[in-house]
Image (spheres, grey):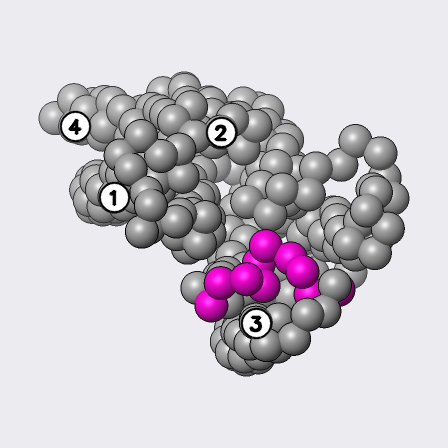
Amino acid sequence: MKVHDYFAVIFSSRNRERVERITLLLSLIGFIIHATLIGINSFFDFELLDRELLKNPISAIYTPFSFILIYEIFLLVYYLPRSFTTSLIKQFEIICLILIRKVFNDVTQIDFPNASFNDASLINLLVDLGCVLLLMLIIVWFHKTNRRIVELTSKTSADEKESFPYFKKAIAVILLVVILLVSVIHLIDFVYLEMNDEHLIKGMNNNLNSIFYQDFFTLLILSDVLILLLSYGLTSNHFKLLRNTGFVISTILLRLSFGAQGVMNALLIILGGLFGYAIIRLYYSYLNTSTN
């Protein structure tokens, strides 16, 4: 059994439905446990429970969103062999979910009775809300343009060689395995940090808004670049190669956003989204011109 054969097994419709049900169940259980711990922490003084995420009831929403994000990453790996466009749209959706989860965290950081317009926490909340709205708008534009491209190219035959989809499926399977390993490493380090107030692995960052996702997007960039390099020898559509290169740049901008804070974080996300949208609009214009 070759590597790419595992793709059909792992991402079968039955397994996808199973993962979706498990995600829903874990989200509900996680929310109940988190809310219960917050309740215990508010009535009893346990040093073990003296954590930022256990001080405000709104923080309980953080946990189910984390499980939903894991499911979305699973779907992103599933969509990776399909097309660069579908993969990038899914990346935007994941970033949007991360931002929405961050908004709930922002709300818990604001002392609303004493807040003013120059309060840093309030500014962060407004910036994140604006970023969510703009990114959702970009996703809508992206879907509309992609639908037009699909309609325009539906009558043309694919120019990919027969072996290329197998390469992409093999890369997706390997990526999923590496993601699981990285997730386990981050989980072990996070638990060790909570128990000993120091990292098990030096240099790791356990910021809850970027934990794991920095490494995930780095792995995603490497996978995209590998697929891009393989496509150079397997396709004759050079403008499509330029489009895919532009999408990789968009992913890099999204990855850089995890290393920034506040307004710069939002700017990099929106820049990545707008750059990706500009690329797909240019590709649509090219197809319109070449077919007419």
**Labelled disc at residue 261:** 2
The number of discs equals 4
**Which callout, 4 or 2, points to the residue nearer the camera?**
2
Q: Say which label, 3 or 2, has the lower sequence index.
A: 3
Percent from the top left, x then y, of residue 72? 49, 57
Where's the N terminus, which quadrant?
bottom right
Q: Say which label, 4 or 2, has the lower sequence index.
A: 2
Q: Amino acid at mark 4?
A: Asn
The boundaries of the magenta stretch are 48-57
Instruction: Identify the residue under disc 1.
Output: 133
Q: CA distance from mark 1 to mark 2?
A: 18 Å
Instruction: Identify the residue under disc 4.
Output: 288
Q: CA distance from mark 3 to mark 4?
A: 61 Å
Q: Amino acid at mark 3?
A: Ser
| Circles 1 and 2: CB atoms closer than 8 Å | no
Q: Foreground: 264 or 144?
A: 264
Q: CA distance from mark 3 to mark 2?
A: 30 Å
| Circles 3 and 4: CB atoms closer than 8 Å | no
- Secondary structure, mark 2, is loop
Q: Foreground: 104 or 91?
A: 104
Badge 4, how many Cα within 10 Å: few under 14, some, many 20+?
some
Q: CA distance from mark 4 to mark 1?
A: 30 Å
